[in-house]
Image (spheres, helix red, strand yellow):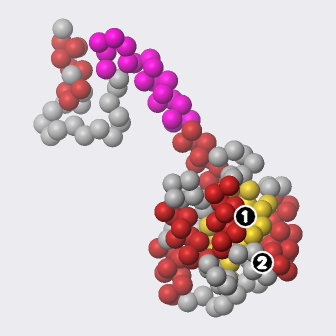
Amino acid sequence: MPPDARILIVDDHKDTLYALENALAPLGRPLGRATSGDEALKQLLRGPVGLVLLDVHMPGTGGLEVVRYMRRLEQTQHIPVVLLTGFARDRQLGGAAYALGVADLVTKPVDPWALRTKVRHLYDTHQRHLALEREIRTLRARLEEHTAGPGRPALPHPHARVPPGQPAGAHTGELERDRT
């Protein structure tokens, strides 16, 4: 995900969208907006989104349904989501939200400073995680290029299982090569 990934703000009330945009503008990140769950899903599929700030209760497709859909798609399943609710928090909503992997559930009206701090932390953490994943893929590819030559197998994956009672490397034939 590019470093210019948007923070997508989703709420069916335009005045709330405006207030949330003003609260998050000092972060200096690109902001996107949607006024419905369906519009949010379209935007999620169109381009890089680094975090979703999502109202729970909207006409049509609500916040929890949007998160359920996001978690089923590879390209959106790891995007952090902060759910907003105008109603008092209840155990059922909280349980459903956290079971879907929502980062937090915030009650409106929100404290702009606290929201900005939370969003900055979640967004930046997600971006660092994605950068580390890219670096790992690049390093694995380079390692594969350097270690896989004629007659020389690539190194095993670090999570490869070694059968009990065998020393590390025995399952790949490394020990046999070392003895010759």
Q: Give the side of residue 42 with respect to residue 35, left or right.
A: left
Q: Which image quadrant for residue 26?
A: bottom right
Name the residue carrying label 1: 8
Dominant secondary structure (helix, strand or loop) of the stretch shown in magenta: helix
Task: Specify few, some or many for label 2: CA neighbours under 10 Å numbering under 14, 14-19, or 20 or more.
Answer: few
Q: Residue furthest left?
A: 165
In the image, what residue occupies the spot 50% across and 87% down? 92
- Residue flagged by tag 2: what amino acid is it? Asp
In the image, taking residue 6 as reference, residue 149 lies left or right, namely left
Q: Is residue 112 left or right of residue 67?
A: right
Q: In this view of the protein, can residue 121 be seen by the observer?
A: no
Q: Quadrant of residue 52?
A: bottom right
Q: Which residue in the protein does label 2 denote?
A: 111
Residue 8 image position (x, y, % from top left):
72, 64
Residue shown at 15% from the left, 33% from the top:
166
Q: Residue at x 83, y 78 (%)?
A: 14
At numbered mark 2, what does the secondary structure look like: helix, strand or loop? Answer: loop
Q: Along the line of sight, which residue is nearer the eye, 57 or 88?
A: 57
Residue 162: % across, % down: 22, 37
Amino acid type, callout 1: Leu
- Circle 1 residues within 10 Å: few <14, some 14–19, many ≥20: many
Q: Quadrant of the C terminus?
A: top left
In this picture, is 110 found above or below 78? Answer: below
The front one of 67 and 37 is 37
24 w.r.t. 140: above or below:
below
- The residue range painted magenta reads 135-153
Is 22 situated above or below 111? above
Q: Is residue 152 a member of the stretch shown in magenta?
A: yes
Left or right? Give the position of 101 relative to 49.
Answer: left
Asked if residue 111 is among those painted magenta in the image, a careful observer would answer: no
The answer to whether residue 60 is above or below residue 37 is below
